[in-house]
Image (cartoon, rainbow, N blue to C red):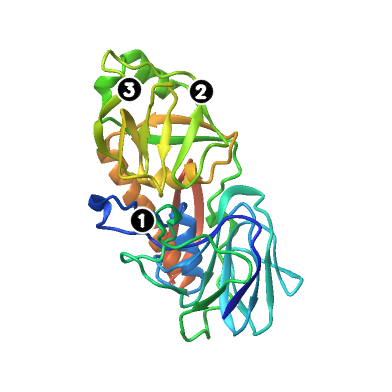
């Protein structure tokens, strides 16, 4: 149904990722920014975990070979048959229409969702591409994709107001972390350096991990190496250089460097959308606080889904750092 006419940057199919296979050494993968990706799916009436297109910085040009409803999410210029259209809104495309997605003005990852989701082979329960292991591959020009067959009527015209959208335009971000588990491999000065300093995202960053440049984090006598231990997205490793590496969605499942902290799940999208050169600082929270923050985020996403489905009416929204709190009432 969809033919890719131009693919100027990394373009992959992603969904919510693989679960239950980390014990076999298979990374989770999936959406780098699950907040934006889930909203993209909600805009076209899909469940939040449906497969869609994730692009890095610059979007593709594609042709519809059948009618479809789609939405593009990101701070980006979008054209349908040469006419500018709104991102963060679902649109109807007829056979032969050409969609052009430009370069993101802010953030690093954008999403294109289609009503019914992208039809693809599920490998270990997921469509998410993880090319390092041969699980899917980056898409290229001339590739053709199919979308699921659904009733399209009523799925076009859904629009997310600007005040409800995440804002990734800042070149300075704060992400919250839970300290540990290898704190005995760091001096107290090293831990304080980590929590009080500003680090910069380097160009040597990708879906596997973000390397940060900044003040050296001092190790204790135990040094930077540990017996290989588990890693998850968000794990902050500190190798012998003393500079942190934050594991992202394609991170390996184990590693041999001491971990000073873990970025909380709710803040991973903020870090994922941080371009090279972005300044990053870390703030400590407790495990209980991390769980409460995640619960609030999930309630927000559910409220946004109901708002887009026409079940809620938004009165006001305010952004508190990376928490988007929706005040809504039943219609």
Q: In terms of image quadrants, where is residue 159?
A: bottom right
292, above or below 165, in the image: above
In the drawing, does residue 277 fall left or right of residue 44? right
Name which residue lies at 50% across and 49% down. 318
Mark 1 and mark 2: span between their CA atoms? 33 Å
Mark 2 and mark 3: span between their CA atoms? 17 Å
Name the residue that disc number 3 marks. 224
| Most foreground residue, 315 or 205 | 205
The C terminus lies in quadrant: bottom left
Asked if residue 320 can be seen in this view, the reply is no
Asked if residue 47 can be seen in this view, the reply is yes
Name which residue lies at 35% across and 20% down. 191
| Most foreground residue, 75 or 159 | 75
Sequence-earlier tag: 3 or 1: 3
Q: Is mark 1 on a helix, strand or loop?
A: helix
In the drawing, does residue 207 fall left or right of residue 18? right
| Most foreground residue, 79 or 134 | 134
| Most foreground residue, 281 or 229 | 229
Q: What element carries label 2?
A: loop
Sequence-earlier tag: 2 or 3: 2
Name the residue that disc number 1 marks. 298
Residue 140 rendering spot, x and y as whole percentages:
59, 64
Whether the residues at callouts 2 and 3 have beta carbons within 8 Å, the answer is: no
28, above or below 279, in the image: below
Name the residue that disc number 2 marks. 214
Please identify, in this view, whether the residue under mark 1 or under mark 2 is nearer the observer: 2
Q: How crowded is mark 3: few (under 14 residues within 10 Å), some or many (20 or more)?
A: many
Q: What element carries label 3?
A: loop
Please identify, in this view, whether the residue under mark 3 or under mark 1 is nearer the observer: 3
């Amino acid at each position: 149904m969809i033919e890719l006419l131009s693919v100027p940057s990394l373009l992959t199919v992603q969904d919510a990722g693989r679960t239950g296979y980390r014990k076999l050494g298979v990374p989770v993968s999936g959406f780098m920014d699950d907040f934006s990706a889930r909203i993209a799916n909600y805009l076209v009436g899909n469940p939040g975990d449906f497969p869609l297109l994730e692009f890095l910085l610059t979007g593709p040009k594609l042709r519809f070979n059948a009618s479809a409803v789609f939405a593009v999410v990101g701070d980006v210029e979008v054209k349908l048959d040469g006419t500018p259209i709104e991102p963060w809104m679902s649109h109807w495309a007829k056979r032969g229409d050409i969609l052009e997605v430009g370069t993101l003005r802010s953030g690093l990852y954008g999403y294109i969702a289609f009503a019914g989701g992208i039809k693809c082979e599920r490998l270990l329960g997921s469509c998410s591409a993880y090319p390092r292991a041969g699980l899917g591959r980056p898409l290229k020009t001339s590739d053709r994709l199919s979308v699921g067959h659904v009733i399209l009527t009523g799925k076009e015209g859904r629009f997310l107001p600007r005040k409800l959208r995440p804002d990734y335009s800042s070149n300075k971000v704060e992400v919250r972390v839970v300290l540990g588990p290898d704190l005995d491999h760091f001096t107290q000065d090293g831990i304080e350096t980590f929590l009080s300093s500003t680090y910069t995202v380097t160009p040597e960053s990708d879906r596997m991990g973000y390397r940060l440049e900044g003040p050296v984090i001092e190790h204790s006598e135990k040094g930077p190496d540990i017996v290989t231990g588990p890693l998850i997205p968000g794990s902050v490793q500190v190798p012998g250089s003393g500079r942190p590496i934050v594991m992202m969605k394609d991170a390996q499942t184990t590693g041999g460097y001491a971990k000073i902290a873990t970025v909380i799940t709710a803040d991973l999208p903020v870090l994922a959308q941080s371009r090279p050169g972005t300044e990053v600082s870390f703030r400590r929270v407790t495990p209980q606080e991390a769980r409460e923050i995640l619960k609030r985020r999930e309630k927000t996403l559910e409220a946004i889904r109901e708002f887009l489905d026409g079940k809620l009416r938004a009165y006001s929204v305010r952004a508190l750092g990376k928490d988007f709190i929706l005040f809504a009432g039943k219609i």
